[in-house]
Amino acid sequence: MHTRNTLLTATACLAVATNAYALFPVLGGEVGVALNTSWGYDSNINANSGEQGDDVLTVTPSLDWTRSQGINHLTISTGFSIVRYGSTGNVNDSINPNFTATLSGPNGVSSNLTYNLGFSFFRSTDANDLVGQITDIYNYDFTTNFTYQVNEKWGVGLAPSIQYQDYRTAGFADILSTAIATSLQYSYSEKLTLDGGYRFRYQYVPSSSSGPTSESIDHTLFIGAFGVLAPKVTGNVQTGISYRDWLKPSTQDNFVYPYVNAGVSWAYSQKTTFTANAGVDLGQSPANQGLETAYAGIGVSHMFTDQFSGGLNFDYIHSFFTGPTNRSDNAYVIGGNFEYIINSWASAGLTASYQWNDSDVSTFQYNRWNVFGNVNIHF
């Protein structure tokens, strides 16, 4: 769903900066630059039953600065994406800035307290399958993670976060989500940690032409494990239960919903890796609807040679919307990719996917496929 896509976009922006090579020292740190270019065809740029297609060119230059001196590791990256559509350019062309900053530590000193702080901003102008059209969103995310190690076996975690989606497209409401999670962690072994905890989350969507104000509180209890889960299997698995307390509108009923957050990787061999992920959680839609989402996916990646690799994945996503108009969607997505490492500073690739979206609302009953080639340069 679109929420996942925005998160992936933010992660991709950070990954571009992380892959950049050092050019020269600045203020005790190192600077790198990158340029990513992609071009291809999307058969359904609005993610709706109209199935309007177009070719899309995206050029993304970025700049990265990393400093590891002292007790803190600091990374700052910034850039922008120039997006150009072939036949719908007058409406959909855009320039989308991005900025990320991360701070972690302490480095080089002995401390029971470790911390990770991150802030990101990025503009997204792409198909939003929550509402079935291209939307213009300014995304702001602030995440923190503190862990205090009480002794060799036990630790306590605290993770406050704020997410704000500023919808610039007329007719849709902004989404504010604030949360704080606390957990008790037990080091079962050097490679495996068990945890359990509680998450409090508040979400607010003001009234718009799509519907009345949506305001809710979620209480989630969870248990899980992360690290080396089995021989050659790494990742994290959390499961639990959530209770949604609707504050507004008063017509919505409170309910209990399962919670799942899992992602694992199995290194089958030195060249082949299998992955699996699953999630069940609650959210809000900019169309003033409550959102219940469940997804599961599997994938495989293989290194054919030292320079050539490929992958294949399949995802299933179920979404249920409640509010002025109820809606149920089932999305089936299959995708693949190839990457060729040209040399130490350049690579090229090809990605393709096909999605079938089944819905009880005709607007969201559609097919969508796309094929994109990309060239990445980093120094």
Image: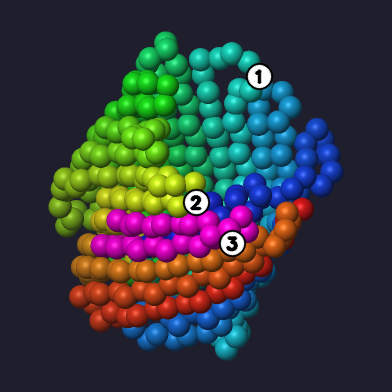
| Mark 1 or 3, closer to the camera | 3
Picture coordinates of residue 145, whole percent (x, y): 48, 31
Picture coordinates of residue 42, whole percent (x, y): 49, 79
In percent of the image, x 60 and y 50: which residue is there? Answer: 14
Which residue bears the numbered disc 2?
A: 271
Crowding around mark 1 (Cα neighbors within 10 Å: few <14, some 14 to 19, many 20+) is few
In percent of the image, x 29 and y 62: which residue is there? Answer: 317
> 2 above or below 46?
above
Give the colour scheme of this rendering.
rainbow
Q: Amino acid at mark 3?
A: Phe
Residue 151, image quadrant: top left
> 148 above or below 330?
above
Q: Amino acid at mark 2?
A: Lys
Which residue bears the numbered disc 3?
A: 308
Q: Is residue 68 left or right of residue 200?
A: right
Picture coordinates of residue 46, whole percent (x, y): 43, 78
Residue 200 is a magenta residue: no
The reply to whether residue 245 is visible in this rendering is no
Residue lying farthest to the bottom in this orientation: 87
Question: Which stretch is magenta?
Answer: 296-319
Q: Amino acid at mark 1?
A: Gly
SS assignment at label 2: loop
SS assignment at label 3: strand
| SS majority, magenta | strand
Q: Give the camera-side residue of 271 and 56.
A: 271
